[in-house]
Image (cartoon, rainbow, N blue to C red):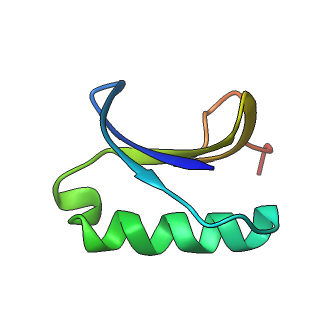
Amino acid sequence: MRCYLMRHGRIENVEFLSESSDERLIMEAEAKFREHGGTQKYDGFEVWVGNRFVFRFPPDKQTQRPE
């Protein structure tokens, strides 16, 4: 389980996450993102379990629901 911290569309840092449910992985990744400076330092983050994509912050415009 990995949290990729992104800047300008590139992976700038990687944090390893505990084995857990997707919901808990996302919460852990959000905490790591904040610990590393959040939006002051990075554009966002992605959560992956092996080769399975779990979550992206901020979400892609294509995957957002229309309002």
Q: Is residue 43 left or right of residue 54?
A: left
Q: Is residue 44 among the parts visible in the rendering? A: yes
Q: Position of residue 37 (x, y in %)?
A: 20, 66
Q: Residue at x 49, y 68 (%)?
A: 30
Q: Position of residue 6 (x, y in %)?
A: 35, 38
Q: Position of residue 10 (x, y in %)?
A: 33, 24
Q: Is residue 12 left or right of residue 52?
A: left
Q: Residue at x 55, y 47 (%)?
A: 2
Q: Quadrant of residue 34?
A: bottom left
Q: Residue at x 29, y 63 (%)?
A: 38
Q: Is residue 5 left or right of residue 42?
A: right
Vertical order, 63 against 23 (above or below): above
Q: Position of residue 55 (x, y in %)?
A: 67, 48
Q: Nearer the viewer, residue 58 or 17?
A: 17
Q: Residue at x 71, y 64 (%)?
A: 19
Q: Is residue 55 left or right of residue 14?
A: right
Q: Is residue 63 among the parts visible in the rendering? A: no
Vertical order, 26 against 4 (above or below): below
Vertical order, 30 against 60 (above or below): below
State the count of labels.
0
